[in-house]
Image: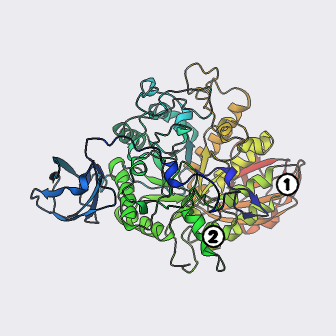
Amino acid sequence: MISARFLPLLAGTLLAAAAPSVAATTPTVTELVAPAAKAASATRIDPTFWWVGMKNPKLQLLVHSPGIADSKLNMAAYPGVTLEGTQKLESPNYLLVNLTIAPDAKPGKLKLEFKGAKKTTVAYELRQRTTPGDKQKVQGLNQQDFIYFLMPDRFSNGDSKNDYIPDMRAPKVARDSMYSRHGGDLKGIENHFDYLKSMGATAIWMTPVVENDMPKASYHGYALTDYYNTDRRYGTLEEYRQFVDKAHRNGLKVVHDVVLNHMGSKNYLFLDQPAKDWFNQWPQFTRSNYNSLALNDPYASELDRKLYNRGWFDTTMPDVNQSNPLVATYLIQNFLWWVEYTGLDAYRIDTYPYSDPKFLMQWGQALTDEFPNLFMFGEAWVGSTAQQAFFARNIFQPVDGFKSNLESVFDFQSQGAIHDALRGDQPNMNRLYEALQGDWMYQDATRNVTFLDNHDMSRFYSVIGEDFAKYKMGVAWLLTMRGIPQLYYGTEVLMKNFSNPDGKVREDFPGGFAGDKTNYFTAAGRTGQAGEAFTYLSTLANYRKTHPVVATGKLMQFIPQDGVYTYFRYNDQGQTVMVMLNGNKDEKTVDGTRFAERTGGFTSGTEVATGATLSDLKSFKIPGRTAWVVEMKK
């Protein structure tokens, strides 16, 4: 998650938010750490279990228990598993155990015996992999997908039993507070799989479902406190695995939201730090400068680079030191673990550029090696197409050893363009054309994720002045443009508001909670323009789903003229769809002969949303503030 309040844009360049300097009189790291909770008597091991048959035979176990560092480890003989040794860290409460698991090792339990002040025996489980060969697991994403993005806490409450978890720091729901938990959960989402499918969605992206046991604003999920557990207010770990399985059986893929560069300050790893160098430590609290330009600026100062990558994202979000190889291994194993355990299809990576660049290459390669079909797309909220392309697979030469292996990024540039094109009275359709012109910098821009808005910015419907005609233009653009479209929950029923503060764009979905007066999950509840909006969007989304040319076809765009932007999706089989957007208030006459290289051989067209026939392809009269999606006919 990256809030707009951290990212003021000025003259198209991402500038640093007002942030304290290194020497600012703010609390020190030591002062920010709450007194460590009483050490649990139980022995904890991360990863909590592992699998035989992984391509990388190495496994690093992080063992946490009071005084465990002084223990001597004996491992009972286990065919195919070799104990390579142990390693102490600064804290006496941690011990690293390094294992090698041969390809022929069988599932079972390793007997690990720690002999110290007291004897501790642990049965560590090795499981059989299930992802290879199961076509429903780790399917990845592609251009034919349509991602529905939601915040689990704000979508629907399907299980009231998890509304109160007494041993968590924010145990209760309080729907009258925008910063408290509201009670949405995994079961609530499951209950509305049919709603998502009726809309034409093929994938669900949820804000993080991992544990976020923070005392304030824990609903958003981006300050994780346990790498190996779900937040019980959404459901148990096993219920999440079942959720992914049920989604797959319903034809829906699952995108798992992850945070690489920071954690929550109540994470046990921060409360009882394995070593000081597991985190980026500063003499005093120091924020990131939030400016990625320093990473590839040939004239940048080392201080600016350090502030960006090693400064903290926020006071309650400790910055993880990914340049420490032990930390890097811990993180990589964790994200391998989630894929193998659940069979999830894609990772959305929060605040992607803030991580250590070399770690990002190592992390991406490790996941691709084990799960070739896993799709990964990152949030790179930056101010130019070149900077955005820098963080995806691109044509650039390595910069300071960094060559991104991330296959996709959020297309903030086209998202900004559709806002610029539709807000206000004067259409700026050239912005839509220009947003695509820089696609030559990507290895494959069609993998990028397009969107109208998200949880960190003002809602699209409000940005365009609650103009329903403009809304339909934006939806038509989203569902016919190159890339993988993503829709933020509630956009389909005209949810609105400005992100001042963020909670206003993260309101509950009407109908998802007991006592709601409106229920937009049902056709009967979607009255008025909310119903019209849903019908229009679902019509185009389902058309896209059944007509691959719109999703995977080639794209040709024409320079906008007189406030009208026209582009085509077409394929080698002769299928062609024309999209025309008139940003003017008034009707415009468009010279159709300009498009002869794409319309030649066709005699008419059918507008997908209305069924209207266009019989003259040499001249078009398109009404003001109108989007046409036209299937060409011979």
Asked which quadrant contains residue 530, the reply is top right
In this view, the residue farthest toward the right is 586
User: Is the residue 23 above or below the residue 403 in the image?
Assistant: above
- The type of residue carrying mark 2 is Asp
In this rendering, position of residue 618 left or right of residue 512: right
Q: Which mark is residue 163?
A: none
x and y percentages locating residue 36 in the rendered image: 40, 44
User: Is the residue 473 above or below the residue 101 in the image?
Assistant: above
Q: Residue at x 52, y 39 (%)?
A: 218
In this rendering, position of residue 291 left or right of residue 276: right
In this rendering, position of residue 90 left or right of residue 32: left
The residue tagged 2 is 304
x and y percentages locating residue 233 in the rendered image: 45, 33
x and y percentages locating residue 53 in the rendered image: 24, 60
In this view, the residue farthest toward the left is 77
The residue tagged 1 is 427
| Residue neighbourhood size for the residue with mark 1, other residues' Cα within 10 Å, grouped as few (<14), some (14–19), many (≥20) | some
- The type of residue carrying mark 1 is Pro
- Say whether residue 445 is visible: no
Q: Looking at this view, is 499 or 167 the one in front?
A: 167
- Say whether residue 22 is visible: yes
Tell which tag, 1 or 2, sits nearer the viewer: 2
Q: Looking at this view, is 205 or 316 the one in front?
A: 316
Considering the numbered disc 2 on the image, is that residue within a helix, a strand or a loop? helix
Asked which quadrant contains residue 524, the reply is top right
| Residue neighbourhood size for the residue with mark 2, other residues' Cα within 10 Å, grouped as few (<14), some (14–19), many (≥20) | some
